[in-house]
Amino acid sequence: MAKKQKEMLLVGSKTKEALKGSGKTTFNVSSDALEALNERVYAMIEDAQKRCAENGRKTIRPYDC
């Protein structure tokens, strides 16, 4: 069964621009790099939600992230 793709949380053009870098060292960005970063963002969000709940709060604070 195919894995359901999660909604993209990143702005593609802005993220690619940041990944490419500037100056003497620039990088190419593969087509699936944004998908991998999106998965990392979802994992970070889950972790922040868990820390918030463990501390008995309903408001996610910067230190949860």
Image (spheres, rainbow, N blue to C red):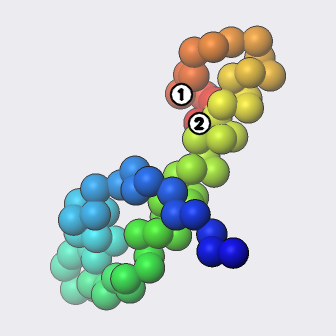
Q: Distance of mark 1 from mark 2, alpha carbons?
A: 5 Å
Q: Which element type, helix, strand or loop, lies under badge 1?
A: helix
The residue at 21%/75% (across/down) is: 22
In the picture provided, is 21 more to the left or to the right than 43? Answer: left
Residue beneath label 2, please? 65
Of the residues shown, which amino acid type is indicated by label 1?
Answer: Pro
- Name which residue lies at 44% across and 54% down: 7
Residue for badge 1: 62
Q: Is residue 12 above or below residue 42?
A: below
Q: Residue at x 52, y 70 (%)?
A: 36
| Front residue (pair 4, 27) | 4
The type of residue carrying mark 2 is Cys
Q: Position of residue 15 (x, y in %)?
A: 30, 63
Task: Work out whether 10 lies above or below 15.
Answer: above
Q: Secondary structure at mark 2?
A: loop
Horizontal and vertical percent for residue 58? Answer: 63, 14
Residue nearest the observer in this picture, 42 or 24 = 42
Residue 18 in sight:
no
In x, y percent, where is residue 49? 66, 31
Q: Which mark, residue 5?
A: none
In front: 36, or 26? 36
Query: Which of the two residues, 59 or 8, is positioned nearer the viewer here?
Result: 8
Q: Please identify the quarter of the rendering in which residue 34 is found.
A: bottom left
Q: Quadrant of residue 4?
A: bottom right
Q: Are marks 1 and 2 in contact (CB under 8 Å)?
A: yes
Q: Quadrant of the N terminus?
A: bottom right
Q: Residues within 10 Å of mark 1 (few under 14, many from 20)?
A: few
Tell me the quadrant of the picture where the C terminus can be found: top right
